[in-house]
Image: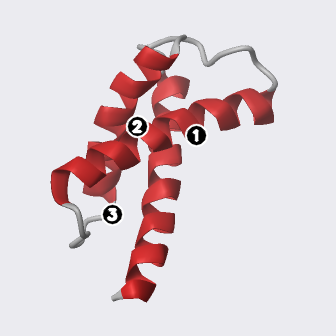
Amino acid sequence: MGIIAWILIGLLAGAIAKALMPGKDPGGCLITMLIGIVGGLLGGWLGKVIFGVESIDGFFSLSTWIAAIVGSVIVLVLYRLVTGRRA
């Protein structure tokens, strides 16, 4: 699965991560979308590194979506830790 597919999945995974972890984040919708994209890419990379597979199964595979959502939640937590200390 290519980087474009991970970006598309990341956009949706960012929205799901935000729904799982509600709260007021600085930046609004644009930052949430960027967090989702980075999280999707992170989830795909972690899936390759941890499980040793060339790529996650495919766009409609449950493992792909879980990896993207977990990656997005990780990035959202890190983002909140970094921005929380600035405020």
Helix, strand or loop at disc 2? helix
Looking at the rendered structure, the kind of residue marked 2 is Ile
- Residue count near mark 1 (Cα–Cα under 10 Å), binned few <14, some 14–19, many ≥20: many
Q: Quote the CA–CA distance across marks 3 and 1.
A: 18 Å
Give residue 55's quadrant in the image. Answer: top right
Looking at the rendered structure, the kind of residue marked 3 is Met
Which one is earlier in the sequence, the residue at label 2 or at label 1?
A: 2
Q: Residue at x 52, y 25 (%)?
A: 64
Image location of residue 2, percent across then percent down? 52, 12
Report which residue position mark 3 lands on: 21
Which one is earlier in the sequence, the residue at label 3 or at label 1?
A: 3
- Most distant residue in the front direction: 86
Residue 42 has which mark?
1
Q: Residue at x 40, y 26 (%)?
A: 7
- Quarter occupied by the N terminus: top right
Callout in the foreground (3, 1): 1
Looking at the rendered structure, the kind of residue marked 1 is Leu
Residue 32 has which mark?
none
Report which residue position mark 2 lands on: 37
